[in-house]
């Protein structure tokens, strides 16, 4: 089965633990739904956060969704001065029969501004 990478991002209003977890759960759930994926299809997820988000690890939200057996990693984005603030990103590696053109990348909340060309 082919392996695909799915991108996604969301923005939170503040560096608040509950907001980070809620937004991350929403992002992961939406990626799974839009791409018709089961948790068993996940190979790994890399989460990044802008340097202004330090209240919680986004991977915790994925574990709370039942993805405890999926390899998860968190990292910090580079601090680009003109970057959109308070952004959580993910790159999920999945097994799927979908072609690259059929993969649905997910940009939510204020992060839609990052990829207006593919955000739904």
Image (cartoon, rainbow, N blue to C red):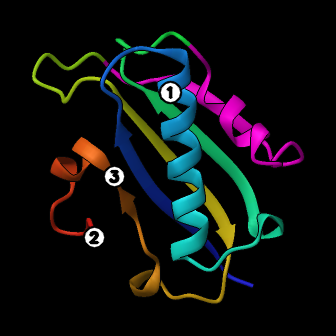
Give how far across and how far down residue 87 sits, in percent: 34, 31
Q: Badge 2 local density, few (<14 within 10 Å), some, or many (20+)?
A: few
Q: Quadrant of residue 3?
A: bottom right
The answer to whether residue 65 is above or below residue 29 is above
The residue carrying mark 3 is 108
Q: Which residues are magenta?
A: 56-78
The answer to whether residue 88 is above or below residue 81 is below
Q: Badge 3 local density, few (<14 within 10 Å), some, or many (20+)?
A: some
Give how far across and how far down residue 42 sits, in percent: 74, 62
Taking the magenta stretch, the answer to whether it contains residue 77 is yes
Helix, strand or loop at label 3? It is: loop
Q: CA distance from mark 3 to mark 1?
A: 13 Å
Q: Is residue 75 left or right of residue 45?
A: left
The residue carrying mark 2 is 120
Give how far across and how far down residue 113 sits, in percent: 15, 49
The answer to whether residue 50 is above or below residue 72 is above
Taking the magenta stretch, the answer to whether it contains residue 59 is yes
Q: Quadrant of residue 119?
A: bottom left
Q: Is residue 97 left or right of residue 9?
A: right
Query: Number of marks in the image?
Result: 3
Helix, strand or loop at label 2? It is: loop
The answer to whether residue 103 is above or below residue 118 is below
Quadrant where the image shows the C terminus = bottom left
**N-term mark: 1 or 2:** 1
Q: Which numbered marker is on residue 20?
A: 1
Q: Which numbered marker is on residue 110?
A: none
Q: Quadrant of residue 56?
A: top right
Q: Nearer the viewer, residue 92 or 57?
A: 57
């Amino acid at each position: 089965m082919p392996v695909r990478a799915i991108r996604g991002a969301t923005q939170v209003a503040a560096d608040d633990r509950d907001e980070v977890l809620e937004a991350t759960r929403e992002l992961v759930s939406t990626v799974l739904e839009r791409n018709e994926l089961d948790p068993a299809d996940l190979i790994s997820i890399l989460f990044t956060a802008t340097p202004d988000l330090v209240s919680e690890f986004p991977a915790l939200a994925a574990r709370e969704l039942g993805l405890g057996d999926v390899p998860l990693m968190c990292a910090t984005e580079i601090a680009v001065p003109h970057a959109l603030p308070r952004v959580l990103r993910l790159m999920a590696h999945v097994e799927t029969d979908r072609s690259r053109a059929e993969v649905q990348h997910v940009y939510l909340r204020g992060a839609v501004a990052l990829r207006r060309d593919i955000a739904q």
